[in-house]
Image (spheres, grey):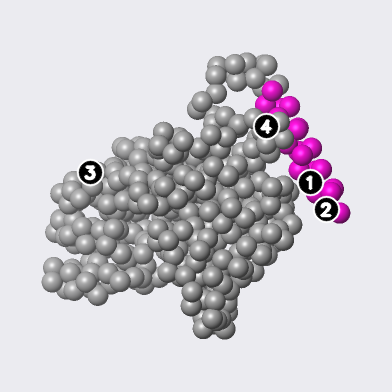
Amino acid sequence: MKISFLIHNAYGIGGTITTTFNLAGALAERHDVEIVSALRHREHPNLVPDPRVRLRALVDLRKEADHPLHQRPARVFPPAEYRHHQYSELTDQRIGECLAALDADVVIGTRPGLNVHIARQAPQHVLRVGQEHLTLDNHSPRLRTALRRAYRRLDVITTVTEADAAAYRRQMWLPGVHVEALPNSVPDPALPPADSTAKVVIAAGRLVPVKRYDLLIEAFTRVAAVHPDWQLRIYGKGEEQPRLRELIERLGMWNNVFLMGAATPMEAEWAKGSIGAAASDFEPFGMTIVEAMRCGLPVVSTDCPYGPGEIIADGTDGRLVPVGDRDALAAALLDLVGDDERRSRMSRAALANARRFAPGPVVAQAERLLETAAAARSTGRTATPPQHRTQSALTGRGHAARDAAHAAAAGVLRSIRKGRR
């Protein structure tokens, strides 16, 4: 199968870039995969894609930022989308040309505006998939209206949590569109897992207000008061760095809390800690939570919408505390810092439970999803989400129907490829 991902800017840093590179690399084990970056602003990407994955850009801002068409606002990319100011008639043109000439079986968009492009401009023979890395509730009413019109032309929409998938099914009315939760994946760690002995709590991500590193630092003052030999290390960069630096100094925490800057990859840093921490007000998924758990760290996190509660089993492989509750966050951290046996037990559970986010299970689900959608398209039916299937799907007849659908999908994709030769 030939698969094309369409991404905003593969040359930057961010969760969507990381997850796209991860999924593309895992799919490249068995498929022909490329990543198409709408924009490019530097020579080399910050993250290195799998060598089997091709990477190309459509608009090079180093050379084309002053292009006359780039001075005019985009017409296809929806105005209500957060990134609209970065798009233009030039990006409309280049993305449209790219999609019209697409030699792929599947095209996957990675943000709402690009999903609209795919819905409106991708050829009919291409399976059209729109990924949502934020949440429906995070989109403005104006954007939801635009998406409701465009998304009806997609074949599949994937969200990163089941809660968000349920919101799309409940609120958007997208007849004929298959909506399913497909979690982000994290590659298998190359280093041995943390051994729970380091006196270090680690947090990572963009230094922006919604991540609430200020709350985490304030909560950690209670930890340091009881356990002054413990440290909090925060990895990342962003607009909040000066304010966080001032907060650390004002609280006198310069010997316990450290702003470490960005680290890519983070695996070696996670392995130096014993506990992961996240204090966000909002987290569509929680990529850093999974990264930490895959390295053997139990994670203390706010139970914010939507991701943490679907990743962490409270009391088993981490702790969930109310959003914005500094005292509860401090108490949960102290609970693990002060109990070596509990921390070690949760570390083992985190390693085991986070395996469901390994590339293997996620890619298997993605392949099954694409096969099912292709089969549904070939017969004019709608692919039924797993949680909506009747009990007959668990019977032998249901399994036979599933196998037949998979075989039909494979035949459809083979026919598409044969027709192009």
Q: CA distance from mark 1 to mark 3?
A: 50 Å
Question: Helix, strand or loop at disc 1?
Answer: helix
Name the residue beneath numbered marker 4: 380
Viewer-proximal residue, 175 or 269? 175
Which of the two marks, 4 or 3, is nearer to us in this view? 4
Residue at 48% across / 78% down in the picture?
Answer: 71
Under mark 2, the amino acid is Arg
Which of the two marks, 4 or 1, is nearer to us in this view? 4
Q: Earlier in the sequence, mark 4 or mark 1?
A: 4
Where residue 373 sits: x, y (%)? Answer: 64, 37
Where residue 322 sits: x, y (%)? Answer: 22, 43
- Reply above or below: 416 against 213: above
Name the residue beneath numbered marker 2: 420
Name the residue beneath numbered marker 3: 322
Q: Residues within 10 Å of mark 1 (few under 14, many from 20)?
A: some
Residue at 40% across / 52% down in the picture?
Answer: 143
Q: How many marks?
A: 4
Q: Earlier in the sequence, mark 4 or mark 2?
A: 4
The circle drawn on residue 416 is: 1
Q: Earlier in the sequence, mark 1 or mark 3?
A: 3
